[in-house]
Amino acid sequence: MPDLVRLHNPALARKLVARVAARANLLAGRLGRRPFLMEVCGTHTAAISRSGIRSLLKETIELRSGPGCPVCVTAVQDLDAVIGLARLPGVTVATFGDLIRVPGSASSLEEERARGAGVRVIYSPTEAVDLARANPGEEVILTGVGFETTTPLVALAITKAKQRRLRNFSVLSLHKQVPPALRTLLSGPEPVADGLLLPGHVCAVTGRRVFDFIASKYGVPAVVTGFEPVDILGAVLILLDLLLRQEPVVVNGYTRVVREDGNPLARELIQACFDYDRALWRGLGPIPDSGLNLRHTYRNYDAALKFPLPTPPVRVREDCRCGDLLMGRIAPPQCPLFAHACTPVHPAGPCMVSTEGACSIYYQLERSC
Ligand code: SF4
């Protein structure tokens, strides 16, 4: 109860905004520019825009989105493979809704479904198992897209399918892990941000400790935070204080959910079903150990082994800036296509489709007209 009182307290939020603005101005005086903070997670991007925090603080802080939207970071090659699988006769691709409107090289899952391909939108991975059980003459392929938060649920679906000895269910694992992506981002030649807001739900699984490298190796402070406006403002305040004190550490600002070592049960589920492997990220390229493939024990449920994966020539619009956006190099309005050639009705890239995509969020919540 005390937490709820604190979280839904407008007077506290107003106080925090004033304190954040004062600290940010102090820091801006030292830096000679506005402090630049990255919210790694797409859910934070949405929460920051929805609560008005970005526009309230825009004169004093630049808050920019990072690579934390799993649909957005799915490489076009991988999406083309999913689309190719959906075209196979007797196959139904089961997917979360965000993916179906993302443009691949030549079409999307939505367009393929309109042409008669088997594409089903699901709301939980175990729905795909139930679908396979109810349709024994059909091959059901679950698209495994998501970070550490979604992967345990897909692992549960795989173990359930194995227990039921289903032969017509498999998973195309495109799962990714956040820490290797942040390593890649921070190792680049350009500074990424003065400080990072870390994804609370991912950290609930991984724990805070695995992110210590951000401060110890790259000298960048970071704060794990939740999704209420007061959570986010509190985390921004901690980050600014750390920057003013020149004290790069990784702080857990979401202690009501996140532990130092995360959720051991969820991690055991992941480890029982998956091995780490290289994965291709949109914008960030190939990253070692950032992807998850099904373990040998579960090879009968691996769609990548069960079906020939189509590899059509990759075509991406040259003027699409999704890659730069996911690296934190630009904000959505800096893409020349934003709100003109790329809208939620006619998206040119995944960031305009997903509910966690920065372009879709800015289009709906940050445009002045
Ligand atoms: S406006 Fe469209 S093309 Fe440009 S970065 Fe956003 S999603 Fe990609």
Image (cartoon, grey):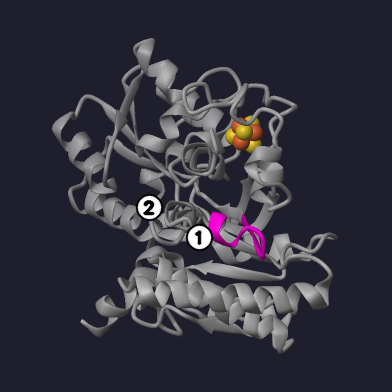
Residue 322 colored in magenta in the image: no
Percent position of residue 274, x then y? 45, 59
Q: Is residue 149 visible?
A: yes
Residue at the image position 72 percent from the left and 79 percent from the top: 26
Q: Amino acid at mark 1?
A: Ile
Q: Which residue is mark 1?
A: 53
Q: Is residue 206 above or below residue 336?
A: below
Q: Which residues are magenta?
A: 55-64
Q: Residue at x 55, y 45 (%)?
A: 358
Of the numbered discs in the image, which one, if any, rests on residue 298?
2
Q: As rendered, which of 129 and 206 lies closer to the eye?
A: 206
Q: Is 34 placed above or below 106 here?
A: below
Where does the N terminus fall, quadrant-wise?
bottom left
Disc 2 residue type (three-letter): Tyr
Marks 1 and 2, how far apart at CA: 45 Å
Residue in the picture at 43% in, 16% down: 111
Q: Are discs 1 and 2 less than 8 Å apart at CB?
A: no
Q: Is residue 205 visible?
A: no
Q: Is residue 284 left or right of residue 201?
A: right
Q: Nearer the viewer, residue 294 or 289?
A: 289
Disc ID at residue 237: none
Which numbered disc flags the more N-terminal residue, 1 or 2? 1
Helix, strand or loop at mark 2:
helix
- Give the image location of residue 243, x and y in percent: 70, 81
Q: Quadrant of ligand 1?
A: top right
Mark 1 residue crowding within 10 angstroms, few (<14) / some (14–19) / many (20+): some
